[in-house]
Image: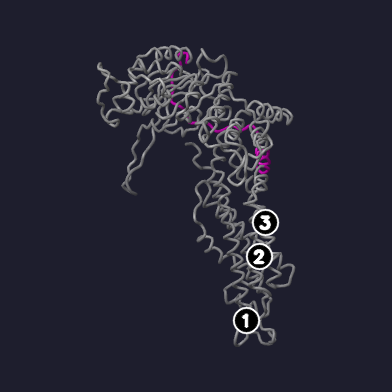
Amino acid sequence: MSSNSYQVSVPMSKRNTNCIPETTSNDLKTFTGGAVLSFHNICYRVKVKSGFLLCRKTVEKEILKNVKLLDVLAARKDPRGLSGDVLINGQPRPANFKCNSGYVVQDDVVMGTLTVRENLQFSAALRLPTTMTNHEKNERINMVIQELGLDKVADSKVGTQFIRGVSGGERKRTSIAMELITDPSILFLDEPTTGLDSSTANAVLLLLKRMSKQGRTIIFSIHQPRYSIFKLFDSLTLLASGRLMFHGPAQEALGYFASTGYHCEPYNNPADFFLDVINGDSCAVVLNREDTDGEAKETEEPSKTDTPLIGKLTEFYANSSFFKETKVELEQLSGGQKKKKISVYKEITYATSFCHQLRWISRRSFKNLLGNPQASVAQIIVTIILGLVIGAIFYDLKNDPAGIQNRAGVLFFLTTNQCFSSVSAVELLVVEKKLFIHEYISGYYRVSSYFFGKLLSDLLPMRLLPSIIFTSITYFLLGLKPQVEAFFIMMFTLMMVAYSASSMALAIAAGQSVVSIATLLMTISFVFMMALQHNEFLGQNFCPGLNVTTNSTCSYAICTGEEFLENQGIDLSPWGLWKNHVALACMIVIFLTIAYLKLLFLKKFS
């Protein structure tokens, strides 16, 4: 929460010179039900490193102006460096508070390839208790759809950058609906009007207003709302440089600032006026501080007046009636409890089992795969075209000295193609990073369920099918060894190569932005090629005019596959072939383990 955002909660605060004052989110004059959320003496400190390498120093700084208060209240902030108390109905937050409350992030994170109803079904399946029947869950889904006015688009896809979907307002309401499935008593929203036009934003806020009147506590931040939206606010909190400028009934804020000497012009938006004042904007100060002659006095630059102005407003609020009323109510709410430092957040609790989560994640990922032809169908088409091109270039390889080099070249090309085509696996855990973090913190599923679900429904089929198609096309066009066993060994080897390369890509890219890994995959392709060479060259005769049984070695060239493999230093025994597959299997296990650990220890709190 900063001076350019509004924390909409209900009044009550207690002054503390170094920390965020005590505040409660329940105005007894406005609400007749819902949970009461209060926060007391919230402080947040971070460790900042500066310098280079061995000369780096770590300094602890108290940075409140950059802290999103909303994340602190919703228990989505890194607990290290955080102190103070956040109470629910006067009691400490339960361990599973993140799962029982609703939190709508600023950027809508819903699966765009699924319909509105399918997204809600996913939320209901993983967040509602297993004791509820499917019929009861569907009734809850239909009730939420009707409450948010999503009836007409319930069976329409949400939409992606490639798929046309619902409107921006309907997408935002879908995000809200995902959180209302659990019927939370408190709903947090991070700037719910982001990306919406003024009319749609107003409709969303009217929806939230209606929900608040039904007894649900609504807390959100918002950036520069228009006047029709501002009128809907019950309570307003203004922060500047981490200090409280005002907290009280929103409709009394103008009168409060008038008492401090700042008067809002008749046609000025109160929200813009508040920003001008607390930011020390020179225009606002000049227009609202007139001398006795009716002329504006000269003012200093904002940079010189910000700190004194913030201090003055903070002190003025500490002596106001709003603060005194807040203090009385907070004392009644807390019951004289001694405040303690916020404890480290406990582990997230889950409503469903690992297997249940795995099944639903796999189902959603598979639907997403089918609903995103750019990632699935396109890859199959490219595989077919590439297979035909390679088959045309190296068509019908001959068993002659030139055929040796052609075979070695095409086998290297096949393994290299499998490596490069597996680079797309990096997007498996990167594209959905925000979605994963939000759903994990909200208690949808465990990290292990998500990881193995993505492997089963996405990685396995998208590497298995292309390998089968690619081998079936190229093997016969190239005229490789005409043996059934050799054909299936080649298919199996290319599948293992694809899985190894994909696992390596996941290990490098898990939990971070897409990185360049093409060069790394290029180097390991030499290792992968050895298995294919063993499979193809063993038993081949490249000097058909000579009797290799009487002449064990040709005097002028390599005549048998065994001679070529020996020159390459490849073991001719069966173990010489299968040890490559064992090595590939070990690489798959190692890389997937690294990817899982990186995902497990990924920083999930802001």
- At mark 3, the secondary structure is helix
Look at discs 1 and 2 and give the one toward the viewer: 2
Chief SS of the magenta region: loop
The front one of 558 and 516 is 516
Q: Which residue is mark 2?
A: 387
Residue contact at pointers 1 and 2, CB within 8 angstroms: no
Expressed as whole percent of the image width and height from the top left, the position of residue 189 reads: 52, 29
Q: Is residue 126 above or below residue 143?
A: below
Expressed as whole percent of the image width and height from the top left, the position of residue 415 reads: 60, 65
Question: Residue 478 sits in which quadrant?
Answer: bottom right
Label 2, label 3: how many angstroms apart (C-alpha)? Answer: 15 Å
Q: Residues within 10 Å of mark 2 (few under 14, many from 20)?
A: many
Instruction: Identify which amino acid the numbered label 3 is placed on.
Output: Leu
Expressed as whole percent of the image width and height from the top left, the position of residue 337 reads: 46, 16
The front one of 201 and 23 is 201
Q: Is residue 37 above or below residue 546?
A: above
Q: Residue at x 58, y 53 (%)?
A: 425
Whether residue 449 is visible to the viewer of this picture, yes or no, is no
Residue contact at pointers 2 and 3, CB within 8 angstroms: no
Chain-order first, disc 1 or disc 2: 2
Magenta stretch, residue numbers: 334-363
Q: Which residue is mark 3?
A: 464
Chain-order first, disc 2 or disc 3: 2
- At mark 1, the secondary structure is helix
Label 3, label 1: how many angstroms apart (C-alpha)? Answer: 34 Å
Q: Residue at x 64, y 43 (%)?
A: 113
Q: Which residue is mark 1?
A: 401
Instruction: Identify which amino acid the numbered label 2 is placed on.
Output: Gly
